[in-house]
Amino acid sequence: MKFTIYHNPRCRKSREALEILSSSKNEVEVVEYLKTALTKKDIEGVLDKLKCNPLEIIRKGEVIFKEKYKGKELNKEEWVEALLEYPILIERPIVIKGDTAVVGRPPERVKELF
């Protein structure tokens, strides 16, 4: 089984989810999304696999969200553009296996994909 994790090594929950995946002896592709720019296609693919809209994976506690987006009503396309411009807003970690994905909060949620 191959997993992809959208990972931020500075995030404890993301590190814990990666540890769970790594200890499972499965192949894991690590995407450090703050270093490797995601494309619109990447983000839309993740949203499809999560079966959610962009607002559901936005970190509303981030300063950039509070300064630029809090209280605003954007459409799906505009939220995707916000995630492209400010990837720090993407909830983490996101783990994908095939056509399904979960947000690893709490990290044990990644086990739902096993």
Image (cartoon, rainbow, N blue to C red):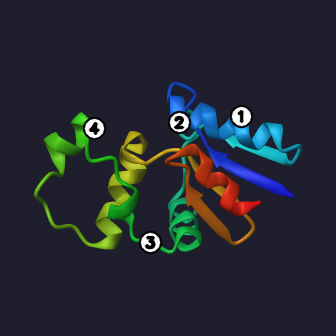
Q: Which residue is mark 4?
A: 62
Task: Answer with mark 3 or mark 4, whichever residue precedes in sequence.
Answer: 3
Q: Which residue is mark 3?
A: 52
| C-alpha distance separating marks 4 and 1 | 25 Å
| C-alpha distance separating marks 1 and 2 | 10 Å
Residue type at the position of mark 3: Cys
Q: Position of residue 93 (x, y in %)?
A: 55, 45
Q: Which SS class for mark 2?
A: helix
**Which of these two is toward me, 67 or 57?**
57
Residue type at the position of mark 4: Glu
Q: Which SS class for mark 4?
A: loop
Q: Which residue is mark 1?
A: 19
Q: Nearer the viewer, mark 4 or mark 2?
A: 2
| C-alpha distance separating marks 3 and 1 | 25 Å
Task: Answer with mark 2 or mark 3, whichever residue precedes in sequence.
Answer: 2
| C-alpha distance separating marks 4 and 2 | 16 Å
Q: Which SS class for mark 3?
A: loop
Task: Answer with mark 1 or mark 2, whichever residue precedes in sequence.
Answer: 2
Q: What crowding class fits label 2: few (fewer than 14 Cα within 10 Å), some (14-19), or many (20 or more)?
A: some
Q: Residue furthest top?
A: 10
Task: Answer with mark 3 or mark 1, whichever residue precedes in sequence.
Answer: 1
Q: Position of residue 8 (x, y in %)?
A: 54, 34
Q: Which residue is mark 2?
A: 13
Q: Is residue 8 above or below residue 53?
A: above
Q: Quadrant of residue 63?
A: top left
Residue type at the position of mark 2: Lys
Q: Which SS class for mark 1?
A: helix
| C-alpha distance separating marks 2 and 3 | 21 Å
